[in-house]
Image (spheres, helix red, strand yellow):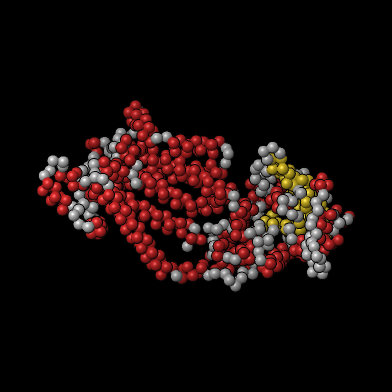
């Protein structure tokens, strides 16, 4: 009795300092992770058996031209020095120039990342909105036909190759029926008519108040986003179901029923309140996976996203672009992890 | 004494792959404004009985009974919605371990308020006031703080008192306490039992005290039912437990060490197959008077 702790009050009282120290440790974690990530990407970039100089000057360049380019790239310096130069440049937002597009990589990334983000966000939102209720219902009605249908839906989602569903979808919904827009983000005559703010066309067209462009963008994003949504739905609904089954077995669920609560209050307020905690991590990870850019989806739908950007760069030895893309993807992962940690603490008082 | 609860010929079955397991087999008993102990070993069906009364046995479990009546009203014929009115409001239940029986992500105050508002349609502030009073009634010293705390911040004894407060706040007629002190330290057990006893008496409630602890039951209850393999094998007044005659009860009593009769070797319970097939003894008040 005497040994109760006082975290209830203590937490509130200490909230400001602990908030600051919390932020400090978060920043520290991010920095450590990022330096580690940069180091690994840098090493991989340097040990890859491709010659960045050759891909700039070409096969038939003279010895002198080659040497000049070699020195200009700083490749004559020791590896550690090169690494610090690399770090310094990145800290200034300078990822070098892309060989392929002949533009600064940072500009390229600003162009391709919003496209991926738009697609991934739409996919995740739809995937969560459909997947979570589906998982909950499958768990509550365990063994019923709804459960079986949810299982089949998820299984198909896991196992169908995206290039096949994507092409068939395009063929039927765009080619035959014309219900959706084709590949690309917009029809050609809508391109570049709205001012670019965020790079996400849906957001930009709303900001500009241009509903025609907005509708066209929707018709283009529906199919690829729907595909990605299907994949995250498959994963999220399965995870939700198993989390839910675990919680429904707990004693506090009996307590809630003993109180006389309705089934929906038992399920949504009590069981789901506890499911939210692990679900946050699952959703964040699936969002992160989509933000990485799904190369196949982007390729099929000619979506100028980060996945196809990095892949193209990799295939043409455009190391600056590859490294820049990797850094962005890594940063996204780290940020999402931190965000899900924060949400975790918000939903679970035991983690505070 | 009027009968608050009457259970007649209760059977609870769980179908398994090739047989049907009968957890409770033809149980009959009644409960007045008294403290009725149900004692038995693990798997004897005592907890299942408690849950069956609240109709909380989930599928595929099957509950059959001639009658489960609360103040003369048969609970078996009620719809699920009417049954929810009974749960909490008329019959409540406290479970073994507050570590698991309280929702870990909900504030304690909210959990108690929820129980109260569900049955009274009271306003938020009214429920809060009532909750704080209830926390005080279970001798929690700093109700305001506990109200805002989460279950993991509480000790086991505190948790069980919170559980009592939560289950008694809608003012039920019957409390089923399913091993309420088994998860607690011995020193805290007594405190919690006293609090529960006081509140149950003050409110003129009936208490079904499910336990495997013969000492606690004989000290705490008015009447005892001894269950074995889904049946009542013996019933007696709690203070007469040491005079029990059924070989199972005698065996249980003899397997406990006693200070006043030290023995070198404690007896081991010798089971008899005939116990399994004997008909259930009636646990009603009337049979009690006859014996």
A202 sits to left or right of A189:
right
B257 sits to left or right of A253:
right
Q: Is residue B78 above or below residue A188?
A: below
B240 sits to left or right of A279:
right
Residue sitting at 69 percent across and 51 percent down? B51
**Percent position of residue B267, x then y:** 80, 59
Foreground of the two, A23 or B265:
B265
- The extreme bottom residue here reads A2
Residue sitting at 64 percent across and 63 percent down? B160
Q: Examine the rendering and report whether any part of residue A160 can be seen.
A: yes
Check the picture and name the quadrant holding the C terminus of chain B: bottom right
Residue sitting at 51 percent across and 38 percent down? A151
Foreground of the two, B244 or B259:
B259
Q: Examine the rendering and report whether any part of residue A309 can be seen.
A: no
**Percent position of residue A333, x then y:** 36, 52
Residue sitting at 39 percent across and 67 percent down? A21
**Percent position of residue A137, x then y:** 53, 43
**Percent position of residue B79, x then y:** 66, 44
- The extreme right residue here reads B290
């Amino acid at each position: 009795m005497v040994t109760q702790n006082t975290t209830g009050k203590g937490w509130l009282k200490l909230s400001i300092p602990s908030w600051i120290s919390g932020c400090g440790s978060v920043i520290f974690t991010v920095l450590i992770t990022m330096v580690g990530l940069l180091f690994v990407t840098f090493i991989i970039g340097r040990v890859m058996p491709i010659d960045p100089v050759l891909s700039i000057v070409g096969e038939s360049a003279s010895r002198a031209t080659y040497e000049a380019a070699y020195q200009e790239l700083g490749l004559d310096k020791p590896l550690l020095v090169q690494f610090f130069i690399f770090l310094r440049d990145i800290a200034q937002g300078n990822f070098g120039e892309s060989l392929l597009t002949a533009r600064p990589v940072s500009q390229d990334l600003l162009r391709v990342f919003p496209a991926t983000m738009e697609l991934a966000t739409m996919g995740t939102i739809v995937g969560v909105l459909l997947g979570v209720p589906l998982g909950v219902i499958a768990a509550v009605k365990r063994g019923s036909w709804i459960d079986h249908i949810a299982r089949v839906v998820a299984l198909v989602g896991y196992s169908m190759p995206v290039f096949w569903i994507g092409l068939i979808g395009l063929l039927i919904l765009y080619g035959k029926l014309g219900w959706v827009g084709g590949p690309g983000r917009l029809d050609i005559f809508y391109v570049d008519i709205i001012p670019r703010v965020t790079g996400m066309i849906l957001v930009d067209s709303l900001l500009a108040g241009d509903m025609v462009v907005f509708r066209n963008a929707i018709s283009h994003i529906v199919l690829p986003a729907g595909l990605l949504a299907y994949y995250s739905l498959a994963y999220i609904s399965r995870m939700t179901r198993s989390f839910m089954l675990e919680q429904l077995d707990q004693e506090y669920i009996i307590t809630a029923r003993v109180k006389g609560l309705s089934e929906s209050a038992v399920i949504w307020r009590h069981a789901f309140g506890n499911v939210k905690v692990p679900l946050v991590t699952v959703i964040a990870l699936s969002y992160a996976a989509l933000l990485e850019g799904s190369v196949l989806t982007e390729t099929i739908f000619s979506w100028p996203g980060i996945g196809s950007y990095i892949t193209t760069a990799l295939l043409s030895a455009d190391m600056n672009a590859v490294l820049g893309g990797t850094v962005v993807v890594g940063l996204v992962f780290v940020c999402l992890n931190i965000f899900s940690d924060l949400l975790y603490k918000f939903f679970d008082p035991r983690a505070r | 004494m009027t009968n608050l609860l009457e259970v007649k010929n209760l059977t609870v079955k769980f179908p398994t792959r090739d047989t049907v397991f009968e957890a409770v087999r033809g149980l009959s008993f009644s409960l007045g404004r008294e403290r009725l102990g149900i004692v038995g070993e693990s798997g004897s069906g005592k907890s299942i009985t408690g849950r069956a009364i609240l109709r909380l046995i989930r599928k595929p479990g099957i509950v059959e009974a001639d009658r489960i009546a609360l103040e003369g009203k048969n609970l078996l014929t009620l719809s699920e919605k009417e049954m929810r009115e009974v749960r909490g409001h008329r019959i409540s239940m406290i479970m073994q371990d507050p570590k698991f029986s309280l929702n870990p992500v909900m504030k304690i105050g909210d959990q108690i308020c929820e129980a109260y508002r569900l049955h009274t349609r009271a306003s938020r502030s009214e429920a809060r006031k009532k909750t704080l009073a209830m926390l005080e009634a279970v001798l929690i010293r700093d109700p305001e703080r506990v109200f805002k705390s989460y279950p993991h911040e509480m000790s086991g004894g505190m948790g069980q008192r919170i559980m009592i407060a939560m289950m008694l706040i809608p003012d039920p007629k019957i409390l089923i306490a399913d091993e309420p002190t088994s998860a607690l330290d011995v020193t805290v057990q007594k405190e919690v039992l006293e609090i529960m006893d006081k509140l149950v008496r003050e409110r003129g409630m009936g208490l079904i005290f499910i336990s495997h602890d013969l000492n606690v039951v004989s000290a705490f209850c008015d009447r005892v039912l001894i269950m074995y393999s889904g049946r009542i094998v013996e019933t007696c007044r709690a203070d007469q437990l040491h005079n029990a005659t059924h070989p199972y009860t005698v065996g249980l009593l003899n397997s406990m060490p006693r200070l006043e009769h030290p023995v070198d070797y404690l007896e081991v319970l010798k089971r008899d197959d005939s116990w399994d097939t004997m008909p259930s003894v009636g646990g009603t008040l009337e049979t009690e008077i006859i014996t």
